Image (cartoon, grey):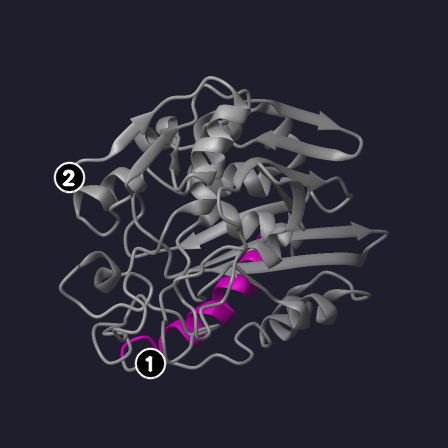
Amino acid sequence: MYPFVFSKPTTESAALAAGADGGRYIAGGTTLVDLMRETVERPSRVVDINGLPYRDIALSSEGLRVGALVRMSELAAHPGVRSQYPVIAQALELGASAQLRNMASIGGNLMQRPRCTYFRDVHSACNRRSPGTGCDAVDGDNRMQAVLGGSAHCVATHPSDLAVALVALDAVVRLRSTEGTRAVPIAEFFLRPGDTPHREQDLRPGELITSVHVPAGPHTRQSGYLKVRDRQSYEFALASAAVALDIRGGVILGARVAVGGVATVPWRLPRVERALVGRRPGRATWTEAAVGAADGARALSGNAFKIPLLERTVRRQLTTIGGLS
């Protein structure tokens, strides 16, 4: 490690002031501590925010509100979340080991940085870590990299399972800084790499995630998360799918589908959603809708398999959530 200033404020105003002064916020530390140990990140000031009161889980007729400091395991185990928002509970349980879920916060999960090997190797070229140095993943070992949303500057996949579920459910991220508060739709919170891959979230200097809000709707109960990976536990997705369906009277009235493991941000599939609405659940419906899952995908040398895998993953999860009759 290297020298840095550490503080643990007990009030929100003190924490935000420290963040505005260049501090990096830390809660569970499951990502930042690793990156500091590997010298990928070297903040001069670290601000422990565990003394702040962002720990509530509230369910109402309007939706679900989750404080940023709620632990992954706590949210996944919440009876109301498991029954009313099963896709969130499933994404959390598939997202990490039990030990990490006990430590990692909801806000920290959304802020985690890429698991790309080249990003974490300080001797490799990586535009996310060091803008302008290049991207070794484009022509290197890119089996795990993105086929959607990449650019010539970065092809790293977004690592969060929870974020995929939240994008499918149109969640909103609440942010606060010394300048005030604002709300950002989670689909806009995550930024595609484009020419500025080092900008991963729509965050202003010193801003802190305080909570996440998920609107209620008839689709949230009939939802779930599927994660396809090389091994059954403690592994990042090759492809994943969050599906939420509103089926009434034997007709699909609403559909929300997002995927992970294949894109640089959690990726919504509007073409698939449009192909579902107004149709009756069944094998033909799921198969025909899933054909559009990989629209716009571009394979690299080592990950062309992700394109058909993505289609199969979406079809399988539509079948699981919607049934065959």
Quadrant of the image for the N terminus?
top left
The residue sitting at 44% across, 46% down in the picture is 111
- Residue 169 part of the magenta segment: no
Residue 260 versus residue 25 in the image, above or below: below
The image quarter containing residue 47 is top left
Quadrant of the image for the C terminus?
bottom right
288 or 258: nearer the eye? 258
The circle on residue 300 is 1
Give amino acid for label 2.
Answer: Tyr
Residue 9 versus residue 91 in the image, above or below: above
Residue 108 versus residue 168 in the image, above or below: above
Magenta region, residue range: 302-320
Q: What secondary structure characterizes most of the magenta part?
A: helix
Within 10 Å of disc 2 (Cα), the crowding (few <14, some 14-19, many 20+) is few
From the image, state whether disc 1 or disc 2 is nearer to you.
2
The circle on residue 165 is none
The image quarter containing residue 172 is top right
Residue 168 at x, y percent in the picture: 62, 53
The residue sitting at 36% across, 52% down in the picture is 113
- 87 with respect to 144 (left or right): right
Residue 288 at x, y percent in the picture: 64, 75
Residue 235 at x, y percent in the picture: 30, 49
Give amino acid for label 1.
Answer: Leu
The image quarter containing residue 25 is top left
Residue 110 at x, y percent in the picture: 47, 45
The residue sitting at 26% across, 49% down in the picture is 41
Identify the residue position indicated by label 2 in the image: 2
Residue 5 can be seen, yes or no: yes
